Amino acid sequence: MAEGVPETDDLSGWTERTLPTNLGAIRDPEREVLTRLAECGFDEDQRFAVRLAFEEALVNAMKHGNRMDPARKVRLTYRISPERIEIRVADEGAGFNPKGVPDPTCDENLQRPCGRGIMLIRAYMDEVCFSPRGDEIRMVKFRHGRCTGGGTKT
Amino acid sequence: MKIETRQEKSCRVIAVAGSADIRASAALRQAFLGAIEAGETRLICDLSATDFICSDALGVLITAYLKARGRGGFLRLANPQERLREVLQTTRLDHLFEVYSDVEQAAACA
């Protein structure tokens, strides 16, 4: 299920938050994550990348997953070490097939005002995968670049 | 995020300072689409002080670009910082928008 996401046994504890489906609820956890990343030595480019992916994942969960239904929640889980950050975002929607999202970089899609979130997440994080139903995204950013070999679930 | 508008030659410059994140999208939309509705269709988005942009904000710029162009005008981007330039390249939106190194150059091509 977690194909592509490394084992995380060597990291410190998880932080878990249940967020309301409210775009304003993204700000506080985003600030917490960015502060922790800075404390752990992630540079500005890396913090920009994580911020972008973090926001895109949470917005997708609220808008497309939960369809902005205030009765639904978003579960955010993350843990950060000086080596990497792993983030998991789960919504209470029906799920989706990430492979069914049109490529927004194709010429015929460039004028579409939406549909770039997942592509940006894939571009700015080192590892990204989805649960089988598509209702949870898991993403990893390494501080010293992507690991090669070992530590990857198969 | 802070939005300021000014005139540069025949163009309306909309300068976006700070983070164009999801919480700023509504204000961004109002600034650009409001300008177009008011008859301003020669638009320049000054990104020199924009430190972050999300896909929703990119969508606002695309919508404004299409509306301005549909009315015979344009929306040009000026002076994006390196990280924003990379976002534009990653999304290939640098193939959609005309991107200039500064506002003066963007306005000079009007």
Image: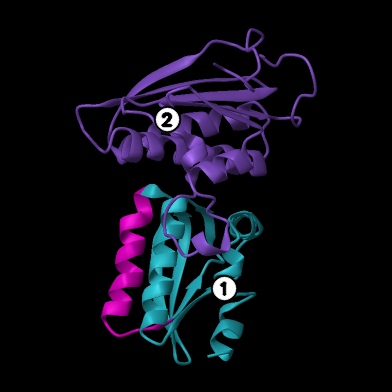
Chain colours: A purple, B cyan
Residue closer to the observer: A106 or B22: A106
Q: Residue at x 48, y 45 (%)?
A: A117
A92 left or right of A111 in image: left
| Amino acid type shown at disc 2 | Pro
Subunit ID for the residue under disc 1:
B
SS at circle 1 = strand
Residue closer to the observer: B42 or B6: B42
Q: Residue at x 47, y 16 (%)?
A: A15
Q: Residue A37: name its quadrant.
A: top right
- Whether B46 is among the magenta residues is no
Q: Residue at x 45, y 65 (%)?
A: B16
What mark, if any, has residue B78 been given in the picture? Answer: 1
Subunit ID for the residue under disc 2:
A
Q: Residue A48 in the image: x percent, y percent?
A: 59, 43
User: Which span is picked out in magenta?
Assistant: B23-42
What mark, if any, has residue A29 been given in the picture? Answer: 2
**Mark 1 surroundings within 10 Å by alpha-carbon count, few (fewer than 14), some (14 through 19), many (20 or more):** many
Q: Residue A3: name its quadrant.
A: top right
